[in-house]
Amino acid sequence: MTGIGVEAGAQAARSRALAVLRVRGRALGVAVLPAAAEVILLAGAATGHLVGPGWDAARWAVGVLAVLVLLATAGIALVVARARPAMTPTVPVAEESAPDLYRMVRDLAERLAVPAPSAIALTPDCDSWLEDRTHPAHGPPARTGPGAADLPGEGRRPRRAPVAPVLVIGSPFLWWMRVGELRAVIAPVVAGTGPSAQPDIAAARRFVRGLDATLAVAATPRRGPLARGACAVLGRVARLLLGACREHAAQMERGVAAAAAERAQTVDYGLRIVAQEQVGLAYAGWDRLLTRVALPAWRMGRWPSRLDAGVVAALTELSRRDRLAEGFTSRLGERPACDLLEEPGSVDEATSLLAARLFHGGPAGPRADWAPVDWQSYPEEVVDRTWRADAARLHRVLDSLGPRPARHTAAPTLARILDHLTEPTDPAAEPMDPAAEPMDPATEPMDSAGPAAIAPGAALVPARIDADTDADTGLTAADDPDEDDEDDDPGTERSALLAAGLSAEVAREENAVPRGATAAGQSPPCTLWDGGALPLVPLQPPRTARELLTDHITAMVCCAAVDTAGAVPALDWLDGPSLLLHGERAADLTPRVLSLIEEGDPGPLRDWLAAAGIRPEKPIRLV
């Protein structure tokens, strides 16, 4: 029954591949029609049937048209054949650095009776697939060891086409899954090498990839009008052909997947059902680790060098907290799939750096402003530095809003933030220190935590914000489509002013950093992937004004706790940076900060500070 299913899926895929090739044939047929008409006209003249001034003019017109169409067809065909298809950035795994892994994959291919993949590569994602790298521009994976990422566009490679597709495996799978689970998960993927070797399917895939690459070429900016016109024609033809074969190509891939899944049922089918649970768990842990733990480090110019090992710690912590995940930790006694690598630490470091490039846009290698950080140094180098950088930015923005109250010293304190955001019960203006002058942003000494300087005379926030104007975007209530979204409302008028200042300051700092550069403002030497700028997949949308204000006030409270109450910065594997007070994690701080922002009520936060022994009137260190 399985053989019948495999045969049916393969035949369906081949029939769809032939349909794709027929689209290509029809396009070529249309292109040679003017030439065929010219041949008929010339034959008529030679035989004496189509003679006269009218036929002579027709021959000249059709001949010129045929030459132009043939030249255009030759040019388009050359671009489709030579255009470089997109290739996923991966970390190549040489056979000498993972002989056990290659042995397992080849044994799996032999059991499935399909060709073995030509090479193995890792990707910082929870997915696995086969990737055809037979195009001459791709070449074989660079054999430079496990420490070098195979990022397309960096360096030239010998033009040698691999025989079979490359097996790309998600690196979190190797660290979280056991050897048997990994074999069961990649069995359907390896089984796909069988249909990929079919000539018609391979030719249809090359044609579709060529059209896709041609669209990328047509989208490349051109300066000259002639080049722009040629690219417009090229893009139009490519889009027309892709539209004609899109449905057939999709059905072809579904047939290939169905045939591979049917064939893989003969290998570890029962174990695969269990392993699929681990796939979902690994995806959840990996996403949480990137957004909560890695992203704050990347913003500070540090990249965690052991992300794959960190996902194991995060999932172990999840299994400890979540009763639904009980029993998963018992698997840790079995052999992990990363033991199939000779140097798992070097591979983990390479995939961690690639993850930083893809999701954040960092440089290709370590340097002074882009350094690796291990998990033991993470609280000090990332958590504490992030808090103090946010606290310094908060005080710079607060200084730009007006004179400092007389009761507050020049040193930065949490009490000043609390007093500023507290809604006054008396409408009279509070007394100001006559000796205190609003600090000029141009002459204010820049803190080392501030990565961007402020232009002379530039205000951080508008002088006044109307009641019906959004403090974050400047749109009026009639123009703002999200005016009813309460999540974007910073709360009181003072909170709105401070949030608007923070948004402007953060935007100014981000604009001062070149696209694809680190937080230190240095652009990496190469930030392109097949013509697209890194990062390819930003992890999170920009933070709203209220989220920025909440993060900065929370950072200020954490700095005060560290400096006045003996608290320490820490790393929570699921929630990222955290504060340890008296050996316990402070998990109830955010609701009290929101009460201050949204209602102007400092009572809950002051009570929390008093219970924790934090003194808001004491100065804090910003650097």
Image: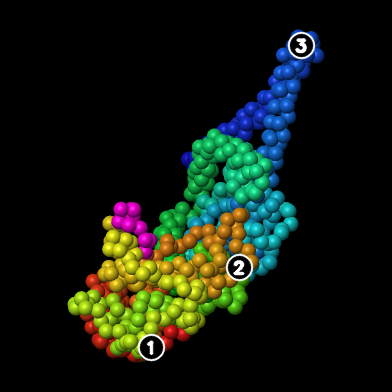
- How are the colours assigned in the image? rainbow
User: On screen, 351 above or below 531?
Assistant: below
- Horizontally, residue 453 falls left or right of residue 489, namely right
* Nearer the observer, 499 or 586: 499
**Residue holding disc 2:** 524
- Tell me which residue sits at (52%, 56%) in the image: 128
* Nearer the observer, 384 or 442: 442
- Figure label count: 3
Magenta part, dominant SS: loop
Sequence-wise first label, 2 or 1: 1
**Residue holding disc 1:** 410
User: On screen, 42 above or below 181?
Assistant: above
Q: Secondary structure at mark 2?
A: loop
- Real-space CA distance between mark 2 and mark 1, rounded to the nearest whole angstrom: 39 Å
- Tell me which residue sits at (49%, 47%) in the image: 261
Range covered by the magenta-colored residues = 472-482
